[in-house]
Image (tube, rainbow, N blue to C red):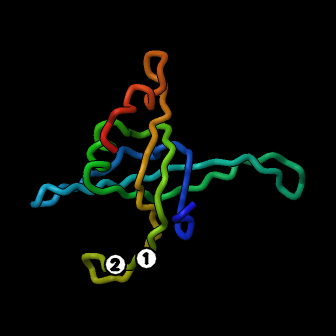
Amino acid sequence: MKNLMNSVRLFGNVGKDPVVTQFENGNKVIKWSMATSERLKNGKGETIDDVQWHQLIAWGSLASVIEKYVKKGSKLAIEGKLNHRRYKTKNGEEREITEIVVKDVLLLEKKNGLTETQETEEMPF
């Protein structure tokens, strides 16, 4: 519990194939979205699904692992931290984004009767 000040853990499904950017120096960044859902009862007692979309980003060797194994529909567990930043578009407009900088990921898919996490346990992330 040493770093709970800014800690996020989510279990969800990837919404789109991740998008990789590779820089001239060889470093990589990868961005993708993930949905989490929760069943709730509304004020009328009806059960509803509350779906939340999250923007995720990962760097370096973790970006390479995600590029190789993660695709639209993948089930993931992630751990990271919230990052809120401002940037300017090519048109000079100021924008704000809140994203999760991913530090660790578990692949939760089944493949040939084994979970992906069992098969990829020795991956370097």
Relative to 48, say whether 29 is above or below. below
Judge from the rendering whether residue 44 lies leftward or rightward of residue 28; answer left or right: right
Q: Which residue is drawn at 43% across and 45% down?
A: 105
Quadrant including the C terminus: top left
Pick the residue in front: 114 or 37. 114
Secondary structure beneath dot 1 equals strand
> Mark 1 highlights which residue?
96
Relative side of 125 to 78, left or right:
left
Q: Which residue lies furthest to the right in this view?
A: 44
Instruction: Residue lying at the far top in this picture: please name it.
Output: 112
Looking at the image, tell me whether mark 2 or mark 1 is earlier in sequence order: 2
Q: Can you say which quadrant of the picture contains the N terminus?
A: bottom right
Seen as rendered, the residue at the extreme left is 24
Count of number-bearing discs: 2
Residue 80 x, y percent position in the rendering? 46, 58
Res. 87 mark: 2
Neighbour tally class for label 2: few under 14, some 14-19, many 20 plus, Cα within 10 Å:
few
Q: Which residue is drawn at 63% across and 52% down?
A: 51
**Image location of residue 53, percent across then percent down:** 54, 56
| Alpha-carbon span between mark 2 and mark 1 | 6 Å
Q: Where is residue 94 in the image (x, y as percent from the top left)?
A: 37, 83
Residue at position x 15%, y 60% in the image: 23
* Residue at the (50%, 38%) spot, across then down: 75
Q: Which amino acid does label 1 sit on?
A: Glu
Label 1: how many residues lie within 10 Å, few (<14), some (14-19) or many (20+)?
few
The three-letter amino acid code for the residue at tag 2 is: Tyr
Q: Looking at the image, which is closer to me, 110 or 49? A: 110
